[in-house]
Image (spheres, rainbow, N blue to C red):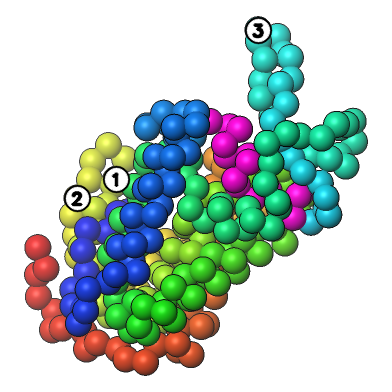
Amino acid sequence: MFPIKDNIPTDRFPFVTVALIAINFVVYVLAIRHGGSLISGPDTSEVVKYGAIPYALTHSGAHCGVVNVPQLGGVVQTVACQGQPGVSGTPTDTIPTWETVFTAMFMHASILHIGGNMLFLWIFGNNIEDSMGPVKYLGFYLVGGLAALALQVAVGPNSTAPTLGASGAIAAVLGGYLVLYPRARVLTVVFIILFFTVIELPAVVMLGIWFAEQALFGAAGLTNPAGGGGGVAYFAHIGGFAFGALAIRLLATKRKQVPPRHPIY
């Protein structure tokens, strides 16, 4: 499901939301200039350098880097960290591990990754910014991203898979929106196998289904030793969403009235 628009008006221009979207796209362009492509995103070395790696965050001084592993038919790149069995040497071109907690929020893996995230941020972020003002909203967004990463790291502290993207912080925005505007109407594109349709859904349904999917796929990943999550940080989404739902009432100072139900095409 992809949202197109909602029916909650805003009283002021969402400067912080627009700035966050712009910063994310600027970072994406800068990242692919150092290696990668516009469609497939930055190369592995950039992702490992600026992504947040749970193993590095839970093991002091354990910097991580890209290594080439020979296999039949070629070479496969993987991530190795200091302190792991059989790993020696010091990776080059790294940044302090604590910085990756923040840089990871603005790195994206592909054009589809950043496009989807920024769409959700634009549709739901402007109302959350409107509810609490720009300064508190920026703090809410950043802390939501930290809370999202914290849960992802807690679930897999020894993982060497880089966590990156704004989806954890945006999940906090979604959690706050669900609490403030459960009866808002969201025009949504719904894909059904090879077909799609556009329908108007209550926010509680649209976001409720989204959260249920994250919980289901996250639980499936825990019970499937071979993985299967496709590289998606589901627990970051869950952590961000839970933070947003819990923190929104402490920060939001106003709530718009939900307009009477009518088509929002």
Tell me the residue that label 3 is attached to.
Answer: 73
User: From which residue to which does the magenta span run?
Assistant: 43-57
- Neighbour class for label 3 at 10 Å: few (<14), some, many (≥20)? few
Q: Residue furthest top?
A: 73
Find disc 1 in the rendering and name its residue.
192
Specify few, some or many for label 2: CA neighbours under 10 Å numbering under 14, 14-19, or 20 or more. few
Quadrant of the snapshot with the C terminus: bottom left
Describe the element under mark 1 as helix, strand or loop: strand
Write down the residue under mark 2: 197
Determine whether label 2 and label 1 are within 8 Å by CB. Answer: yes
Disc 3 marks a residue whose amino acid type is Gly
Kind of residue indicated by mark 1:
Ile
Q: Is residue 11 left or right of residue 162?
A: left
Q: Earlier in the sequence, mark 2 or mark 1?
A: 1
| Secondary element at image label 2 | strand
* Marks 3 and 1 in Cβ contact (< 8 Å): no
Q: Residue at x 48, y 53 (%)?
A: 106
